[in-house]
Amino acid sequence: MAWFKKTKDIKADKKVKIPEGLWVKCDSCREIIYRKEIDRNLKICPKCNYHFRISARERIKLLVDEGSFVEMDAGLSSDDPLDFRDKISYRDRMEENRVRSGLDEAALYGEATIEGHPVIVVIMDFSFMGGSMGSVVGEKVVRAAEAGIETRRPLITVASSGGARMQEGMFSLMQMARVSAAIGRLTDNGILYLSVLADPTFGGVTASFAMLGDIIIAEPRSLIGFAGPRVIEQTIKQQLPEDFQRAEFLLERGFIDTIVDRKDLKKTVSRIIELLA
Ligand SMILES: [Zn+2]
């Protein structure tokens, strides 16, 4: 019988403590980088080209023509159908997230132009409850698709989400069918739909509108999948390959169509619209 047992890989567990603010540890290559250097570089890691998460408002600035975005159905909020409570009530949690993120929900949508092309955009924000898709996010995607059909404008979504919102249980899961049906109607009407996947895109969002794009674009080094790697490893009892679920890994296997650097995204989307819409 062993008296001492090494239960954990200590090296992997050691967390590097960095003072908040000045320095950032890259989620992908673990390098420690001066925050200003990342900010100057469109929030991209200068070492490995990992694209850090950005807010919905920052995304709008990068993707659409300046001043062209007009938000639709702002202030739409969930009814808390299950009267859900974990450590705190769902209502309080939403309020907390509103204050912290400055957003009403995990997605906003509206009309805009991209290099002069009129479009409808849906932008998700991971900082609001992990970008989770509840009834409001689902509703916004459905309405955005309907606006696309009505105005004959291409739809562009930028996903960044941990998946369905557990606080709304079945009402969240239902959104997967609703948004998929809405995208189906968009396609039936011959409207172009481009899906951009930002880090991270997971769960019910991957399993619905994010993977239904006519063209699926991902940001470099983004993690994209359905279940997380730990769950998969425990289920199949095998070690996963390096870079599993990274955008580059998915591109090689045909899950996505292209990987586009943040600085080129607007130009690329505009070019695709010119060619296909
Ligand atoms: Zn990096």
Image (tube, helix red, strand yellow):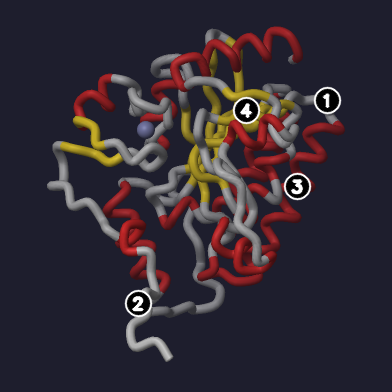
- Look at the numbered disc 3 and give the secondary structure of its residue: helix
Would residue 93 be found to the left or right of residue 157 on screen? left
The label nearer to you, 2 versus 1, is: 2
Instruction: Answer whether residue 57 is visible to the viewer in this image.
Output: no
The label nearer to you, 2 versus 4, is: 4
Q: Earlier in the sequence, mark 2 or mark 4?
A: 2
Q: CA distance from mark 3 to mark 4?
A: 18 Å
Residue name at image x 40 percent, y 15 percent: 66
| Residue that numbered label 4 is attached to | 217
Mark 2 crowd level (few <14, some 14–19, many ≥20, 10 Å Cα): few
Q: Earlier in the sequence, mark 3 or mark 2?
A: 2
State yes or no: discs 3 and 2 in contact (Cβ < 8 Å). no
Amino acid carrying label 1: it is: Gly
Nearer to the camera, 245 or 168: 245
**Measured from the top left, where is residue 26 in percent x and y?**
33, 38
Amino acid carrying label 3: it is: Ser
**Measured from the top left, where is residue 185 in percent x and y?**
81, 38
The label nearer to you, 1 versus 4, is: 4
Would residue 167 be found to the left or right of residue 250 on screen? left
Amino acid carrying label 4: it is: Ile
Which circle marks residue 88 in the picture?
A: 2
Residue name at image x 57 percent, y 56 percent: 229
**Measured from the top left, where is residue 28 in percent x and y?**
41, 39
| Residue that numbered label 3 is attached to | 180
